[in-house]
Image (spheres, helix red, strand yellow):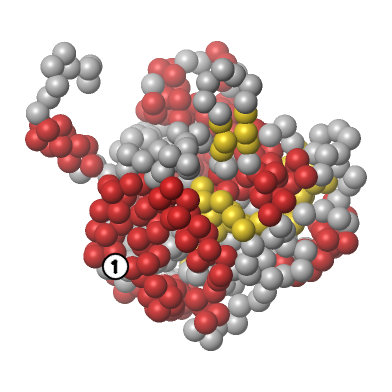
């Protein structure tokens, strides 16, 4: 599209949007077991959309001009804090921003000589690597145990005088494994270092599972030594995207997350988050979603999702097995059968209208498929699709990576190839990034390469996609 000289009729523009959306994966219904969270209650999502619209044009840039955002944020953060051990917080656009703020606060609270370090389990979310990258810090990854849980003694051994933050996950995303938070927080506290609990994905399921009588180990701000915690409302809070909360045990630490600037001749800038101008739509929608679902609703959704996850684990087709022992409805499934390739399985599922999220092998953890099970998930249909896709993937066999391709790609000087050249390379192996076809071979090639090479290729992939 080029910008039209005269504005187009609304109906024409909306038709075009609808046509584009037709190629997307469905955001409701439970056939996409990652990225989207469906309560199965349409009225909740419709209300969120209305509330989003109500707040859409309100600008969070100036909370004195729009006091509604202060009131709404206090209520949302207060509701989250009440379930997660107290504290004071900030409403952010997502887990990445919540983590960015916690990392910045820790860096600024405890200046060290040299490059500040974050000690984190290898299963921690890449948002910590991103924060380190953006904030001029160093991430120090520490291996996990056979159950994908952080090892307190290894965390202790990784601390240096430059450590400004210790991270643990409640739970980590890839296998839904719960780190031993009390032990890790005690180690951090003894060293005088803040400890962040990443409860982005688990923070709004674990309290409800505990309420419902499940065994949930201590993980929140009530644990001694935990200084901050992130909880995404756009995951198991079922709010539209753009909704997360970062909590701080100490208001002084929250202030370290803030930013103010009077270094220009314009309006004074006071930001609690990374963005400056931003829509209050996500805040209004998250507030409405929390209020509409309520504690009983979240308890019900959490229990239903966890029951579904357990049925999925119990019913896995032959040759597939769960990795670890997930404490929330996140299920990672690996293959024990060399004839059944998980990336091929994901492609077969996609062709049948399902999305199963591929996860590459990493530090001895096998390649696997990740299932985020939500309130709407129908395990019967999911297991049926999984069995069909597994059968087809076995029949098709593992992706046929041409001889020498991995070595050739590893040896490529990516700087000598432009986006068009990279797109040709993708096409030559049958991959169609925009339509989702042929991704098994892309994943198989990535899987055979070390992380740094994967990252270089992923950047090129993204660039080619948008070229
Ligand atoms: C999703 C997630 C994040 C990042 O959240 P975004 O909202 O995607 O930025 C961080 N940590 C964990 C454990 C997550 O599951």
**Label 1 residue SS:** loop
What residue is rendered at 50% in x and 34% in y?
276
When the figure is inspected, residue 146 is found, relative to residue 139, above or below; the finding is: below
Q: Could you say which is closer to the camera, residue 259 or residue 306?
A: 259
When the figure is inspected, residue 408 is found, relative to residue 102, above or below; the finding is: above
State which quarter of the image contains the N terminus.
top left
When the figure is inspected, residue 267 is found, relative to residue 369, above or below; the finding is: above
Q: Could you say which is closer to the camera, residue 131 or residue 251?
A: 251
| Left or right: 330 in relation to 456 | left
What residue is rendered at 49% in x and 84% in y?
212
When the figure is inspected, residue 157 is found, relative to residue 171, above or below; the finding is: above
What residue is rendered at 12% in x and 37% in y?
15
Give the labeled residue for mark 1. 40
Q: Residue furthest bottom?
A: 213
Q: Residue 45: where, in percent of width, then height?
A: 28, 60
State which quarter of the image contains the C terminus.
top left
Q: Residue 7: where, in percent of width, then height?
A: 14, 21
């Amino acid at each position: 599209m080029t910008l039209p000289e005269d504005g187009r009729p609304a109906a024409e523009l909306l038709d075009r949007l609808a046509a584009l959306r037709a190629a997307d994966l469905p955001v409701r219904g439970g056939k996409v077991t990652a990225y989207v969270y469906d309560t199965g209650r349409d009225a909740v999502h419709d209300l969120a959309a209305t509330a989003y619209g109500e707040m859409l044009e309100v600008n969070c840039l100036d909370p004195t001009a729009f006091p509604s955002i202060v009131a709404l944020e206090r209520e949302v953060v207060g509701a989250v804090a009440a379930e997660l051990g107290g504290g004071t917080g900030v409403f952010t656009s997502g887990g990445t921003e919540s983590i960015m703020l916690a990392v910045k606060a820790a860096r600024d609270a405890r200046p060290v000589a040299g490059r500040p370090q974050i000690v984190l389990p290898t299963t921690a979310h890449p948002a910590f690597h991103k924060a380190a990258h953006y904030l001029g810090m160093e991430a120090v990854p520490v291996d996990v145990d056979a159950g994908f849980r952080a090892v307190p003694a290894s965390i202790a051994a990784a601390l240096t005088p430059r450590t400004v933050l210790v991270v643990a996950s409640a739970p980590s995303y890839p296998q839904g494994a719960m780190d031993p938070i009390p032990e890790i927080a005690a180690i951090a506290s003894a060293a005088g270092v803040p400890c962040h609990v990443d409860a982005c994905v688990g923070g709004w399921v674990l309290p409800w599972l505990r309420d419902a009588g499940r065994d949930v180990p201590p993980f929140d701000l009530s644990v001694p030594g935990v200084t901050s915690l992130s909880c995404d409302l756009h995951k198991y809070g079922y709010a539209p995207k753009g909704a997360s909360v970062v909590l701080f045990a100490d208001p002084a630490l929250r202030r370290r997350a803030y930013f103010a600037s009077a270094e220009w001749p314009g309006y004074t800038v006071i930001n609690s988050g990374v963005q400056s101008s931003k829509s209050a739509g996500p805040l209004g929608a998250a507030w409405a979603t929390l209020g509409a679902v309520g504690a009983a609703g979240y308890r019900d959704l959490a229990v239903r999702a966890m029951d579904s996850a357990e049925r999925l684990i119990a019913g896995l087709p032959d040759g597939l097995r769960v990795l670890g022992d997930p404490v929330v409805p996140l299920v990672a499934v690996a293959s024990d059968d060399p004839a059944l390739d998980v990336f091929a399985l994901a492609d077969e599922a996609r062709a049948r209208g399902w999305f199963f999220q591929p996860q590459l092998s990493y530090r001895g953890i096998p390649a696997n498929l990740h299932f985020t099970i939500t309130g709407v998930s129908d395990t019967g249909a999911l297991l049926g699709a999984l069995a069909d896709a597994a059968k087809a993937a076995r029949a098709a066999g593992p992706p046929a990576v041409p001889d020498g391709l991995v070595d050739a790609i590893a040896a490529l000087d990516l700087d000598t190839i432009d986006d068009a050249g990279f797109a040709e390379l993708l096409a030559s192996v049958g991959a169609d990034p925009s339509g989702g076809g042929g991704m098994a071979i892309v994943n198989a090639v990535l899987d055979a390469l070390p992380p740094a090479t994967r990252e270089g290729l992923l950047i090129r992939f993204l660039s080619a996609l948008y070229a």
